[in-house]
Image (cartoon, grey):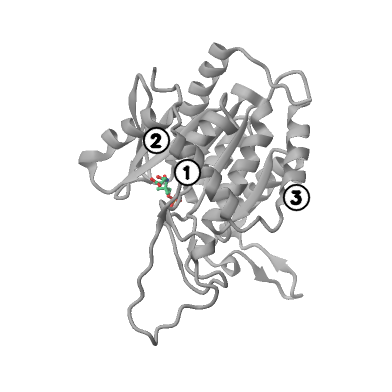
């Protein structure tokens, strides 16, 4: 078996089934399905098939109580996903941006770190104006954002918890499956490895009066296998591997490539993930570095991935079938 052939164990299958059976149902599942249907319809029309990519972005939370006051979070600001979305749109892809609520958004990545109020001021008649030193940035962002939305190239779907994230990922994957090899998954979100199953979770806020609290965390089933084998078997799949120890990074990326049948694993280190990443495939390990602080490493990364995706489409030769 080559490394892009996916294998799936019975444990992956039954673990995924149990996870979805016991997860609290998505509140707006029907609305999401409708939005996806319309997005797929719009982007599958026409003679030249458009590429479609699902970008996941930001960290998932693990609630500790059903009426959640406390939760475990995952490190991720969503900047990578937001930047990558912009470059995918620029490359002609339709993008489904599955993102953590409140994380960085495409076309306004300068927010929320800088206050929105720094970007506007009032003139003498109290009209809102953008100061000259921000005008170029805001003008470009407005133009590009409205172009992407106007052309129907951007669908934004927010999540907070691991339950929402995986249910939305499943809906997206099964909705865009008809694009076959023209679809891509770019899984930059930082997804929890452990969670508290809904039925064993405290209903109300956990009380501290009774002293230390023991809690058992279950392992989140390996959904990458399920994605590759069942939800979207023809899609081009790119996952990310974040590590803090440089000595184990590429070894872990290689292992993920083989274990989950990914086409690409993007390996990055916490210490410098904004400056460089390593693109790991069956045949290559390519370092991608930004040339200066004013550039995004994502610009080169998306350039390389869209090339690899084109090769994949040419090899597979199938066309979308979304009728
Ligand atoms: O969202 P961000 O720009 O702050 O960080 C991006 C990242 C480091 C979360 C991403 O590149 C990544 O590695 N995601 C996968 C993390 C993981 O190994 O679970």
- Identify the residue at horizontal 67%, vertical 17% (top origin): 319
Q: Which residue is mark 1?
A: 188
Instruction: State the SS at label 2.
Output: strand
- Contact? badges 2 and 1 (CB < 8 Å): yes
- Contact? badges 3 and 2 (CB < 8 Å): no
Q: CA distance from mark 3 to mark 2?
A: 33 Å
- Identify the residue at horizontal 39%, vertical 22% (top origin): 3
Q: Is residue 221 visible?
A: yes
Q: Which residue is mark 3?
A: 30
Of mark 3 and mark 2, the one earlier in the sequence is: 3
Q: Is mark 1 within 8 Å of ligand 1?
A: yes
The C terminus: image quadrant: top right
Residue 124, picture quadrant: bottom right
- Identify the residue at horizontal 32%, vertical 49% (top origin): 270
Q: CA distance from mark 3 to mark 1?
A: 25 Å
Q: Residues within 10 Å of mark 1 (few under 14, many from 20)?
A: many
Q: Position of residue 113 (x, y in %)?
A: 49, 63
Q: Is mark 2 within 8 Å of ligand 1?
A: yes
Q: Which residue is mark 2?
A: 266
Instruction: State the SS at label 3.
Output: helix
Q: CA distance from mark 2 to mark 1?
A: 9 Å
């Amino acid at each position: 078996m080559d490394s892009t052939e996916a294998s799936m164990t019975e444990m992956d299958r039954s673990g995924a089934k149990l996870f979805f059976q016991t997860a609290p149902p998505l509140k707006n599942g029907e609305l999401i399905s409708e939005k996806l249907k319309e997005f797929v319809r719009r982007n599958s029309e026409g003679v030249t098939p458009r590429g479609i990519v699902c970008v996941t972005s930001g960290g998932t939370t693990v609630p500790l109580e059903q009426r959640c006051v406390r939760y475990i979070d995952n490190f991720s600001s969503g900047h990578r996903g937001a930047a990558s979305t912009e470059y995918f749109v620029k490359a002609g892809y339709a993008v489904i941006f599955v993102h953590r609520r409140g994380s960085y958004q495409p076309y306004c990545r300068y927010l929320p770190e800088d206050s929105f109020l720094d970007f506007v001021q009032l003139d003498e008649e109290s009209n809102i104006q953008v100061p000259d030193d921000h005008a170029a940035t805001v003008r470009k962002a407005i133009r590009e954002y409205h172009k992407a939305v106007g052309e129907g190239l951007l669908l934004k779907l927010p999540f907070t918890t691991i339950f929402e994230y995986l249910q939305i990922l499943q809906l997206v994957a099964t909705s865009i499956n008809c694009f076959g090899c023209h679809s891509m998954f770019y899984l930059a979100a930082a997804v929890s490895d452990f969670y508290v199953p809904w039925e064993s979770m405290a209903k109300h806020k956990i009380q501290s009066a009774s002293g230390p609290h023991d809690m058992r965390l279950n392992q989140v089933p390996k959904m990458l296998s399920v994605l590759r084998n069942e939800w979207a078997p023809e899609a081009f799949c790119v996952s990310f591997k974040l590590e803090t120890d440089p000595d184990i990074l590429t070894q872990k990326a290689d292992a993920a490539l083989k274990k989950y049948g990914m086409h690409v694993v993007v390996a990055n280190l916490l210490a410098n993930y904004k400056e460089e990443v390593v693109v790991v495939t069956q045949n290559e390990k390519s370092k991608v570095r930004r040339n200066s602080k004013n550039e995004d490493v994502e610009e080169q990364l998306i350039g390389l991935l869209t090339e690899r995706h084109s090769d994949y489409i040419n090899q597979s030769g199938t066309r979308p079938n979304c009728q």
